[in-house]
């Protein structure tokens, strides 16, 4: 946060809860954010300008993408996407207005192929859309926003074993293959520099 204190979202496997920890008070404290079933895998956290936490995560029982925030002073949780199995490999970022932008993986029950999806509440209500559905895509997503609020997402194409990148900076979503040399692209992480250029780290399975 603005004071340099840490805020961590994580999954409690023993109790199947979403938890949150911070040392903002000067010592570590942990809180249960959501205990409604098996909730909390694939969690990602971002802080707004006031230091409030915004967390995306997966509801394993119902297959939903969920979102939690303490911006009101107490924790509130919301279902963002309940279509099929939505919310694996989530990544969250906040824009200048504090609106949330979430990238995640979606698949239908018993379907061998999944899609990269994106959700935002920038309009005041949650909207979800499919960004890339060419094969089994959307694993290990990571999202970053540029100065204009456009989204930049790195992710893994499991069908082709490629690192991919998608952005709506042009006004509509476009996706690109970044690296296709062998099986590459798992565990991606993306960041943008001051000019808005993307920098992505990822794992090369072929070469280890």
Image (spheres, helix red, strand yellow):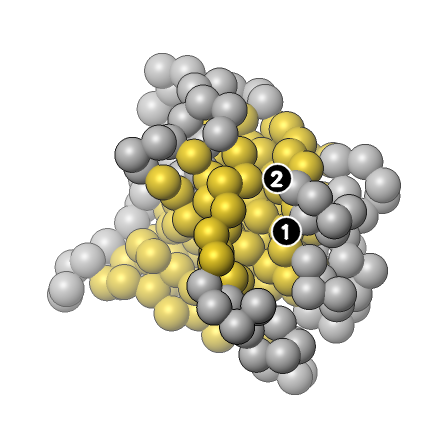
Q: Which residue corresponds to mark 1? A: 54
Q: Is residue 160 above or below residue 5?
A: above
Q: Quadrant location of the N terminus?
A: bottom right
Q: Which quadrant of the structure image shows residue 145?
A: bottom right
For this view, does 123 lie left or right of residue 183?
right
Residue at the location (36% across, 40% down)? Answer: 12
Measure how far apart labels 2 and 1 are at the Cα level.
7 Å
**Which label was assigned to residue 166?**
none
Q: Is residue 144 above or below residue 59?
A: below
x and y, in percent, of residue 88 in the image? 44, 37
Q: Position of residue 176 (x, y in %)?
A: 51, 57
**Residue 167, horizontal then vertical, whole percent:** 63, 57
Do the residues under discs 2 and 1 have CB atoms within 8 angstroms?
yes
Image vertical order of residue 125 relative to residue 176, above or below: above
Tell me which residue sits at (64%, 34%) in the image. 77
> Which badge, 2 or 1, comes first in the chain's sequence?
1
Residue 99, percent across and down? 76, 52
Mark 2 crowd level (few <14, some 14–19, many ≥20, 10 Å Cα): many
From the image, which quarter does the C terminus lie in?
Answer: bottom left
Residue 61 appears anywhere in the view: yes
| Left or right of 207, for residue 71 | right
Residue 67's label in the rendered image is 2
Q: Nearer the viewer, residue 30 or 141?
A: 30
User: Does the rendering let one see residue 6?
Assistant: no
Q: In this view, does 65 lie to the left or right of 51?
A: left
| Disc 1, SS | strand
> Is label 2 in a helix, a strand or a loop?
strand
Farthest residue toward the left?
Answer: 207
Tell whether 177 sits left or right of 13: right
- Image quadrant where residue 171 sits: bottom right
Name the residue: 77% across, 47% down: 72
Q: Nearer the viewer, residue 111 or 9?
A: 9
């Amino acid at each position: 946060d603005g004071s340099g204190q840490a805020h961590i979202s994580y999954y409690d496997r023993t109790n199947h809860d979403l938890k949150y920890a911070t040392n903002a008070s000067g010592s570590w404290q942990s809180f249960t954010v959501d205990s409604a079933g098996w909730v909390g895998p694939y969690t990602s956290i971002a802080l707004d300008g006031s230091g409030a936490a915004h967390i995306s995560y997966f509801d394993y029982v119902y297959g939903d993408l969920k979102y939690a925030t303490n911006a009101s002073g107490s924790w509130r949780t919301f279902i963002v996407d309940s279509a099929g199995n939505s919310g694996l490999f989530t990544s969250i970022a906040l824009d200048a207005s504090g609106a949330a932008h979430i990238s995640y993986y979606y698949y239908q029950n018993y379907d061998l192929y999944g899609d990269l999806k994106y959700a935002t509440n920038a309009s005041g209500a949650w909207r979800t859309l499919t960004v890339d559905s060419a094969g089994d895509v959307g694993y290990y997503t990571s999202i970053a926003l540029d100065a204009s609020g456009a989204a930049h997402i790195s992710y893994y194409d499991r069908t082709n074993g490629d690192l991919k990148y998608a952005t709506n900076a042009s006004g509509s979503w476009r996706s690109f293959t970044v690296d296709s040399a062998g099986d590459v692209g798992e565990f991606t992480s993306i960041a943008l520099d001051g000019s808005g250029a993307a920098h992505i780290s990822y794992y090369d399975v072929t070469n280890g």
